[in-house]
Image (cartoon, helix red, strand yellow):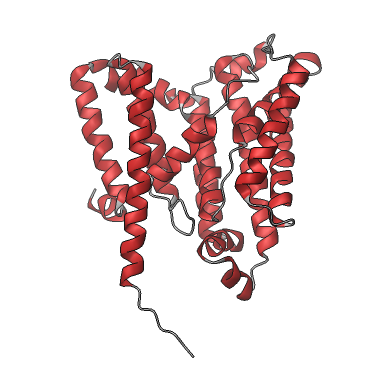
Amino acid sequence: MKKIIGALKGQEAAIAGIIAVMSVIFTIRNPIFFSVENLMDVLKANSVLGIMACGMFLVIISGGIDVSVGAIISASACVAGTVLVRCSSNVFLAFLIAGATGAVLGGLNGLLISRLRIPPLVVTLGTYSIIMGIMVYLTNGSWITGIPDSLMRFGGLRPLGIPIQAYFFAGTVALTWFLVKFTLWGRGVFAIGGDELSARRIGFNTTVVQHLIYVYIGFLAGISSMVHTSIMQQIDPNAFKGYEMQVISAVVLGGTNIAGGYGTVGGVVLGVVFLAVTNNGMVLMKVPVYWQQIIIGCIMLFAILFNIVRKKKAEAKNVRIDVE
């Protein structure tokens, strides 16, 4: 336990403590909160958020932002869902197509950002509008139903009593941790977020590194689309409007610097758990939806302010030497 506590730093330790306190409060107010069934439902319902937060973590670490993830999830779900309904009921094929669709769309973002040097916010805002417009046109804004029983059975699997969707979340966390910890590309992501010019000078191909970041988050968006479909058993093209704000909130709450250069995968997991616990607890306590939105918004603003204050304190400790 001491090792776990010692591994947490700053905002991560604070979030872990707040999660523990809130869990106790919610359990006292409604014992259902800490039941195994409720915890498994929370884990299942927030698996998509966790998967996407891992991808957004790398984007923010690099100093970028991606507000097109909701549109990419919708597009990937619609493409893969259409294949499931009309051509094949193979679940593996659906995940493959969804992942490929997401990677292509994410790669388009990455191409515009890394090659043409267009700011990430401008690019992803534009692609969000384009993709959503195309999806609404092709689907007429209607849900895609008639999802094969194969995906429904897959979505109901619980190996070792844990929802299958949670394994996708855990696998994404493990993969992201491995990439940032043991690969040159992962080091490049942090280097770009710290100082892109310096990263280029020490030998990183910043264009390739940046491009692959958006391919990765696009791929995760595609996988998330099928994970979500396995839960809902239908596809709503408009289900993920504004979803990017939840994803960004989870990453920032976990201690990742919104300006890039600093953050941990463990912090991202804590951010996801924090939002999951807060939302579920407020639902069980029958807090009105508008108050839930207000509370989450206030928490996010506080997290960003905490980030800014911490960064200023760190910069104040640095010694600046001017060389003439």
Residue in the picture at 74% in, 44% down: 108
Q: Is residue 183 visible?
A: yes
Residue 38, above or below 169? above
User: In the rendered view, would you say 167 is above or below 7?
Assistant: above
Q: Please provide percent x and percent y for residue 53.
A: 50, 40
Give the answer, above or below, for where 272 lies relative to 6: above
Which quadrant would residue 189 be assigned to in this image? Answer: bottom right
Residue 261: where, in percent of width, then height? 48, 59
Q: Residue at x 38, y 46 (%)?
A: 304
| Residue found at x 24% / y 30% | 22
Q: Nearer the viewer, residue 216 or 158?
A: 216
**Residue 225 locus on image (x, y percent):** 62, 27
Q: Is residue 13 above or below residue 152?
A: below
Residue extending farthest right: 87
> In the current view of this chain or complex, which residue is farthest to the top?
146
Any part of residue 36 in sight: no
Residue lying furthest bottom: 324
Q: How many marks do you count on the picture?
A: 0
